[in-house]
Amino acid sequence: MPDIAPSTARTRPPEVDRVAASRAAVAARRARAVVKAAIASGERSPVEVLDAASAEPGGAEGTLRITDFLMSLKAIGATKTADILHRLEIAPVKRLGGLGRHQRARLREFLIERFELPATQHRTRLTVLAGPTAVGKGTVARFIREHHPEVMLSVSATTRRPRPGEVDGVDYYFVSDAEFDRLVADHELLEWARVHNSHRYGTPRAPIERALAAGKSVLLEIDLQGARQVRAAMPDAVLVFLAPPSWEELVRRLLGRGTESQEEQRRRLATAKVELASQEEFDARVVNSTVADAAREVVELMNARARRPRRAVTSSGR
């Protein structure tokens, strides 16, 4: 039997089908536009829309692109959208209804933190203390923990070994590289970084969330990289830069504690110069001339709770 070429009419949908499909596409775009407008006006909460997308992936909410969804939210533009997607590990081509289980969970957590928490539980109660190596961040933080029990001091996880006098679970959670890898993979860290091209440090997320939800003031004592991550994740956090009285004093403190090799000391001092140049990124600056005075000023800043202007505010430290 001779081959019969398929009819052109059979390879193209009938005209009426194409018209119907076009009308359906227009209707779907309009439905998504209505959803975006409702989000932008506050008529619908972002979490409600995400839940609707999960329940009906083919609906207006489910077919909404993640980028369009985020840019419908208050104070989130293209740059912040890109940062959020990178942090949540979501591709910009994704639609709300097509998110994986872990992606959806991370996005939902972000939305609750950013848009659903009552004002008394929001991020103005979170303070980040950062500064260069050997400036005394840990010493100031320990003083605050001992003398200001109303402040919750976050305990970081680290892959480095304990220094003399440090207690696991009090000063740090000392963990193996394998355990740190697991914490990162399971998204159990609010922030983490490799410091001085050596060991890794990170802030466990769950204790922070519980404390903030309970209305407590929380202090994070972390490095510059971590402070930047917290600023991106929680814009209302107050960032405090702990500075040395002078460069010479910083060098003296680092060399005097004798806990690092000469190579490690050189690496830390090189990093410290970079960290000192970042002071303008912080909301306030406290000079650590004496531990008690520096701790007092940090607590005073925490008690103020109002967001500081984004400029360095120099304190005497005395």
Image (spheres, grey):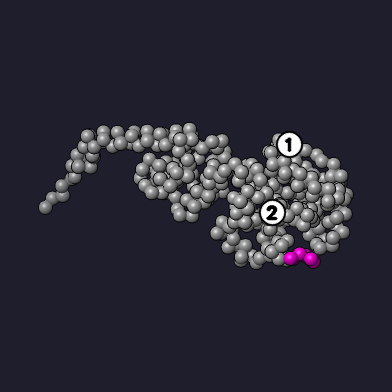
Instruction: Sort mark 2 into few (<14), some (14-19) or many (20+) by Cα contacts within 10 Å.
Output: some
The disc label shown at residue 152, or none: 2
Q: Please state if 134 lies on the left or on the right of 26 as rendered.
A: right
Q: Please state if 90 lies on the left or on the right of 163 as rendered.
A: left
In the rendered image, residue 100, in percent from the top left (x then y), is placed at 45, 53
Q: Residue at x 65, y 55 (%)?
A: 203
Q: Secondary structure at mark 2?
A: strand
66 is higher (above) or lower (below) than 197: above
Can residue 241 be seen by looking at this rendering? no
**Amino acid marked by disc 2:** Met
- The number of numbered discs placed on residues in the rendered structure image is 2
**Amino acid marked by disc 1:** Arg
Q: Quadrant of the C terminus?
A: top right
In the rendered image, residue 310, in percent from the top left (x then y), is placed at 70, 37
Which region shows up in magenta? 162-167
Judged by its main secondary structure, the magenta piece is loop
125 is higher (above) or lower (below) than 146: above
Residue underneath mark 1: 311
Q: Please state if 316 lies on the left or on the right of 191 as rendered.
A: right
